[in-house]
Amino acid sequence: MPIYKQVAELVRDKIERGELKAGDPVPSEAALEKDHEIARTTARRVARELREQGLVYTIQGEGTFVGQPGTPRSPRKTPLYQKIAEEVAGRIQRGEISPNRAIPGEKVMMRKYGVAKVTARQAVAHLREQGWVFTVPYRGTYVTTPEKWPINQGS
C-alpha cells in the first residue's frame, strides 16, 4: 500500500475514534511531513486522499478540516501565524533581534514551527502591518526602529 494511503488511514482512524471531530483541523502538511518522515508532496496526497474519501475539506491558507465543506470549524484560540508573529515580536522587544537586523527567514520559520510557506508569510505580513518590521525586496525583512513599534505608538 502506498505510504500516502497508510498515513491517510492513520488520520481516518483518528476521525473514526473521535480524536478528530467535525470542524477540527487535521494535521498540516508540515506536521505530517515531520511526524511521518514523508515528503511534502506525499503529505499533499494524504490530504487529497482524505478529501476524495469525503472525510475532510480544505480552505486555502487556513488548512484542512474534518467534515464536509461548510462544516462549522472548531474555535481556534489564535491563528498560528499570529502566534509566530507574537513570538518574533517578543524576541524584538527583549532585544534578541536588534533594529535594522534581519528576522528569521521563511525557510527558518517553516522548519522551526512546522508550518507551510503561506503561514510563514502571513506571520511576516502581520509583523509588518503592526510596525515591527520592514521588508526590502530580494534582501529580507528587518526590525524597525523602536519608535515605530506598536507598543510605543501613542505614548
Image (cartoon, grey):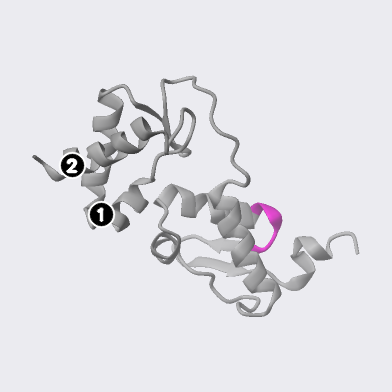
On the rendered image, what quadrant is the C terminus found in? bottom right
Q: Position of residue 129 (x, y in %)?
A: 66, 52
**Residue shown at 23%/37% (left/top)?**
9
**Residue shown at 26%/50% (left/top)?**
40
Residue 93's place in the image compared with 111, above or below, is below
Write down the residue under mark 2: 6
Q: Is residue 59 visible?
A: no
Say whether residue 136 is magenta: no
Q: Position of residue 56 (x, y in %)?
A: 37, 28
On the rendered image, what quadrant is the N terminus found in? top left
Residue type at tag 1: His
Residue type at tag 2: Gln
Residue 97's place in the image compared with 114, above or below, is below
CA separation, marks 2 and 1? 10 Å
Decide which of 44, 6 is in the foreground and name it: 6
Residue 36 bears which disc, if any?
1
Q: Residue furthest front?
A: 17
Residue 93's place in the image compared with 137, above or below, is below
Q: Which residues are magenta?
A: 129-133
Badge 2 density bin: few <14, some 14–19, many ≥20, Cα 10 Å: few
Decide which of 54, 138 is in the foreground and name it: 54
Decide which of 73, 129 is in the foreground and name it: 73
Residue 115's place in the image compared with 52, above or below, is below
Q: Quadrant of residue 60?
A: top left
Give left or right: position of 84 versus 154. Answer: left
Give left or right: position of 12 versus 118. Answer: left
Residue 69 bears which disc, if any?
none
Q: Secondary structure at mark 1?
A: helix
